């Protein structure tokens, strides 16, 4: 019988850092924790140091360079091939209702999670600037969005736009009321064609950058299944449709417009 | 002592399985313990037992396993009672293997973990070992047919354990069990391997199957009232199940989608409890109330309905949590708001919950069982005296069977017998 698969407990800090405690890495000599970007070449190696009771520890600091994506987590001893880690206890309480300092004008988010195959991976987001979505308000004619910006400032020209993903055309534009870095706006649906509308913030108006509105600052790796909203029925030139706000697999805010039967 | 547990399937997941492992692992520190699983459907158990606990199985139903295709598997069981909910999984083969096991079992104490297996143990254990039946569910939730079967078989046990005093009283009051020790022994819940909650967050947490009995619809409605007064607090409900669609619709109908979240199932659950500051239970019935103890061990005061059977025996109302009226959303909201609005009280109850839930530690629960087993063994299990006593109370049980209608008169005598 093979040795028990190594496992890692994980503790998240409010600045995006993660501490891993690995059990039973197997094999002698120095060991490393290896993070590999799924579908990419990039790899981050962190030296593991003894932490008592047979466990090894390492820390991924909040300011470490970890581009956005899914990172699979392995342990590798001096003489062996990397072995995939199983998740242990993920202590993510410091991520709930997280308000990051926004040091360096960027927001770093790392959320460890168990994959559908039961392995340990880390979702990473790195955004500068960032527009965080908070409460949504589903109204009869539009979607209310409360949020906050990081790494940028809201100007008088700021607005939110809904962009048709297929045609990349802006189909709706909403001015916003701002209070410091917090904002609120109501994006009118109008009469959208079936498809997907992505929501973007333009903090300094048309001339400046586009910032994707997303929900990143908590402990939920996959928002789609947890942050669920009712739809509204709309009459359009394309026939009756239903518009439902949702979070994409990358936790960006979009609106799905589907034909109502 | 040599202690032998008999369990439906030690390779799966579920409350009874977890409880049995927790208990067996702790007893194994002092005693020789084995877990005998009637069925085996996979290579390795989901929960790893302590290496000191021996594991074996009686019927190997793995694809290509030793018993795959055995014609006896298709013939219905005759000893395992038809009224047990698992009847369909049992067979002539399981009947035979369990009988062979119990006829030769090398143990001082044999412990059954569900009604059907307790019936096997009562009827088929060789003379000698102490026969203990565990009830993880409750008597008043058993069907009339199952109750009749148990009434017949349980007088042949030496001891019957329930998870609550309330359920133990039901057995003492409605079943003639002369000479049978009826004891309430709560389920063990280990200390979590994570720091307890610090109570700083504004989250209420609930966890359980999304089943009608859990009444999460009541919790969602109660939270609508909480939101009116404290929109800064939110609710997470962990778990999966058939009520999900209805709950989703209710959340949307009440416009609570920014306040109430259906989180889906979470394993392990402890890291989720510690994200909350208050736990909520709104069930109409809890045969024990495992999640209440889990939440308390994670440092959360629990607001729970005072439903049968467990909550009132776990929570010390006003000290380490709150008990509120069943099926009353206002009462649930009131209990939650009391703790939400009073941070000092909440912290005080959180500390009390952490401290008081220590009585459910596996080491403490194992002590209950040890003293029960030791007393029965000393009384003469495994000896001629024990055998004599065994056959004697079996006869008394049969004699008393006819006297069922004389309830009140019998109850007094029964209590005496039960606590001898």
Image (cartoon, grey):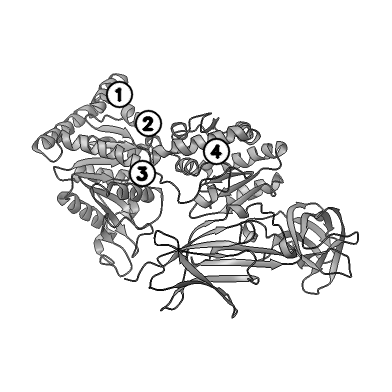
Instruction: Categorize mark 1 by other alpha carbons within 10 Å: few (<14), some (14-19), many (20+).
Output: few
Q: Quadrant of the N terminus of chain B?
A: top left
Left or right position of B263 against B108: right
* SS of the residue under disc 1: loop
Q: Earlier in the sequence, mark 4 or mark 1?
A: 4
> Quick one: which residue is furthest to the left in this view?
B384
Q: Earlier in the sequence, mark 4 or mark 3?
A: 4
Of A11 and B50, which appears nearest the observer? A11
Q: Residue furthest bottom?
A: A41
Determine the image quadrant of residue A40. Answer: bottom right
**Chain ID, mark 1:** B
| Residue for point 66% across, 67% down | A125
Q: Position of residue A145 (x, y in %)?
A: 78, 55
Residue B282's disc is: 4
A147 vs A250: above or below: above
Q: Secondary structure at mark 2?
A: helix
Name the side, left or right, on which B192 lies relative to B365.
right
Q: Which of the 4 image quadrants contains residue A214?
A: bottom right
Q: Disc 4 to disc 3, how far (Cα)?
A: 26 Å
In the picture, the disc for residue B362 is 3
Residue at the spot 81% in from the left edge and 58% down from the top edge: A234
Labels 4, 1: one chain? yes
Label 2 crowd (10 A; few <14 / some 14-19 / many >=20): some
Alpha carbon separation for disc pair 1 and 2: 24 Å
**Residue wearing tag 2:** B165
Instruction: Provide the chain ID for the residue under circle 4.
Output: B
How many numbered dots are placed on residues in this image? 4
Task: Pick the residue in front: B293 or B420.
Answer: B293
Residue bearing the label numbered 1: B405
Q: CA distance from mark 2 to mark 3?
A: 18 Å
Name the N-terminal-most of marks 2 and 4: 2
């Amino acid at each position: 019988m093979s040795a028990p698969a190594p496992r890692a407990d994980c503790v998240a800090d409010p600045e995006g850092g993660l501490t891993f405690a690995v059990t039973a890495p197997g094999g002698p000599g120095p060991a490393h924790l290896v993070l590999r970007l799924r579908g990419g070449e990039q790899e981050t190696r962190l030296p593991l140091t003894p932490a008592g009771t047979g466990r090894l520890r390492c820390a991924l600091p909040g300011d470490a360079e970890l581009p956005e994506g899914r990172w699979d987590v392995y342990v590798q001893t001096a003489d062996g091939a990397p072995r995939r880690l199983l998740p242990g206890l993920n202590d993510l309480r410091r991520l709930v209702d997280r308000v990051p300092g926004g040091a360096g004008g960027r927001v770093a988010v790392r959320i460890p999670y168990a994959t559908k195959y039961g392995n340990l991976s880390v979702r990473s987001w790195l955004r500068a600037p960032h527009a965080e979505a908070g409460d949504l308000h589903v109204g009869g004619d539009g979607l209310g969005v409360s949020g906050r910006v990081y790494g940028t400032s809201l100007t008088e020209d700021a607005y939110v736009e809904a962009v048709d993903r297929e045609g990349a055309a802006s189909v709706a534009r909403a001015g916003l009321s701002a209070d410091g870095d917090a904002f609120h706006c109501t994006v009118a649906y109008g009469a959208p064609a079936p498809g997907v509308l992505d929501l973007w913030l333009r903090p300094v108006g048309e001339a400046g950058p586009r910032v994707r509105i997303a929900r990143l600052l908590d402990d939920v790796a996959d928002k789609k299944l947890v942050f669920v909203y009712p739809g509204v029925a709309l009459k359009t030139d394309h026939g009756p449709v239903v518009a439902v706000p949702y979070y994409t697999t990358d936790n960006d805010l979009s609106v799905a417009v589907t034909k109502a039967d | 002592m040599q202690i032998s547990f008999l369990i439906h399937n030690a390779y799966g997941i579920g409350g009874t399985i977890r409880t049995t492992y927790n208990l067996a692992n702790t007893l194994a520190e002092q005693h020789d313990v084995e877990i005998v699983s009637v069925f085996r459907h996979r290579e390795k158990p989901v929960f790893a037992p302590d290496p000191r606990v021996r594991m074996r199985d009686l019927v190997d139903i793995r694809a290509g396993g030793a018993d795959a295709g055995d014609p006896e598997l298709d013939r219905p069981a005759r000893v395992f009672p038809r009224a047990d909910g698992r009847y369909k999984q049992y067979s002539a083969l399981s009947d035979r293997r369990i009988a062979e096991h119990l006829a030769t079992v090398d143990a001082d104490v044999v412990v059954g973990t569900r009604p059907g297996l307790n019936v096997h143990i009562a009827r088929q254990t060789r003379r000698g070992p102490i026969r203990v039946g565990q009830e993880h569910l409750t008597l008043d939730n058993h069907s009339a047919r199952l109750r009749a079967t148990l009434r017949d078989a349980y007088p042949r046990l030496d001891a019957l354990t329930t998870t609550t005093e309330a359920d133990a009283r039901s057995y003492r009051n409605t079943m003639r069990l002369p000479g049978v020790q009826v004891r309430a022994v709560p389920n063990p819940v280990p200390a979590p391997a994570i720091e307890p909650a610090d109570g700083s967050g504004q989250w209420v947490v609930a966890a359980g199957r999304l089943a009608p009995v859990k009444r999460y619809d009541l919790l969602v409605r109660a939270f609508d009232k909480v939101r009116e007064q404290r929109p800064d607090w939110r609710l997470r409900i962990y778990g999966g199940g058939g009520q999900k669609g209805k709950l989703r619709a209710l959340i949307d109908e009440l416009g609570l989608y920014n306040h109430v979240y259906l989180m889906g199932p979470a394993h392990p659950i402890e890291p989720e409890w510690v994200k909350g500051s208050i736990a909520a239970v709104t069930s109409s019935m809890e045969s024990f109330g495992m999640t209440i103890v889990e939440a308390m061990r994670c440092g959360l005061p629990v607001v729970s309905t005072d439903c049968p059977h467990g909550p009132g025996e776990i929570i010390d109302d006003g000290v380490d949590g709150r008990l509120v009226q069943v099926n009353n959303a206002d009462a649930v909201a009131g209990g939650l708001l009391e703790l939400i609005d009073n941070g000092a009280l909440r912290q005080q109850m959180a500390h009390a919950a952490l401290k008081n839930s220590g009585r459910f530690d596996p080491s403490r629960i194992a002590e209950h069982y040890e003293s029960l087993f030791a007393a029965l063994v000393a009384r003469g299990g495994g000896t001629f005296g024990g055998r004599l006593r065994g056959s004697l109370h079996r006869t008394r049980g049969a004699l008393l069977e006819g006297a069922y209608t004389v309830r009140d008169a019998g109850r007094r005598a029964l209590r005496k017998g039960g606590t001898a």
